[in-house]
Amino acid sequence: MDYKNITIAGSGVLGSQIAYQTAFHGFNVSVFDINDEALQAGKNRIQNLMKRYQKDLSASEEQVNTAFNNINFFSDLSLAVSNADLVIEAIPEVVQIKLDFYHYLGRVAPEKTIFATNSSTFLPSQFAQATERPEKFLALHFANEIWKNNTAEIMKHSATDMNVFNEMIKFAKAIGMVALPLYKEQPGYILNSLLSPFLREAQYLVVNGIADPETVDKTWMIATGSPSGPFAILDVIGMNTPYNLTLAAAEAGDIEAAKVAKWLKTEFIDKGKLGIATGEGFYKYPKPNFLEPDFLKN
């Protein structure tokens, strides 16, 4: 595998994690985002990750600093990809934004560059033609907190070159992931095929006034032994991705999704309660109620 220079497009929750995980494993990383403000927010996320790697992985100060120094930041996409072997796209889950991005990326990236989307729910075939190199395009999806939840789902579409597919499996392993190949397109891959309905039904329970978020989480945690419930998981994901997904479903005519989208926007996004990243979502951080010793008791 010849990949050395990796560009991450998007420095949000997952983009920043992908960038730091890749740099931590010795690759040269370029991070692209739309402006300096977004890049600074991404840089702050990455600096916070350094502490998590020391705590969760027992990484040394030298290791986390070396990884950070392997990262450069750009607001000019053509500069960010000028020598890229691989571009991993982790931009908002909005079809038109992704299409516009790939139209431009296909023009400015070197011919050698492989493109991978980290899209949570969209299929790579939706964007393959926009890349102008469909044979060098596929999906590479990570779970949140990827240094611990180290899954990488690699999904090809019908035109993906099998050599590219196999190289991506090797790359995923090289950055410490458990590589999970998918040979056919599947909306939501494996993880989100299971997770999305779970989170959706939890939100319906609350938005329809059946139970509050803590009760839903408590039910799931006690009944299954899980360390967290759906609303704690949503806080890790952040509110923007669930909002974009439910808004898309609402625009396609889903009445229940429309209620959830309105609720997420007015009660959380508009109030700056985006989850762990902002210190508050369904819970307040760093000491959320679901981690309290008495949370699962009467």
Image (tube, rainbow, N blue to C red):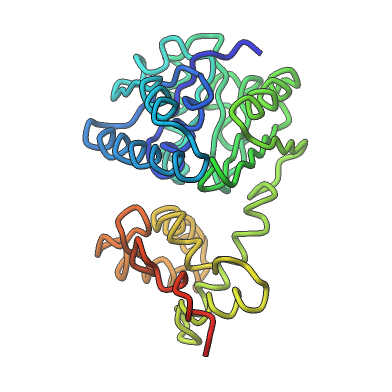
Q: Position of residue 48 (x, y in %)?
A: 35, 42
Classify residue 200 as left or right of residue 8: right
Q: Which percent across, then down, holds residue 7?
A: 45, 22
Left or right: 188, with 20 as reference point: right
Quarter residue 276 falls in = bottom left
168 is higher (above) or lower (below) than 146: above
- x and y, in percent, of residue 67 in the image: 42, 25
Toward the bottom, the furthest residue is 298
Please state if 165 lies on the left or on the right of 27 as rendered. right
Q: Residue at x 52, y 76 (%)?
A: 204
Residue at 50% of width from left, 72% of height from top?
203
Which residue is nearer to you in this view: 14 or 150?
Answer: 150
For residue 201, above or below residue 74 = below
- Report the residue at 41% width, 73% height from top: 289
- The answer to which of 42 and 271 lies nearer the viewer is 42
The image quadrant of residue 195 is bottom right
Residue lying farthest to the left in this orientation: 37
Residue at image position (37%, 59%) is: 275
Quadrant containing the N terminus is: top right
Tally the marks: 0
Task: Return the x and y of residue 247 as percentages of the image width and height.
Answer: 44, 60
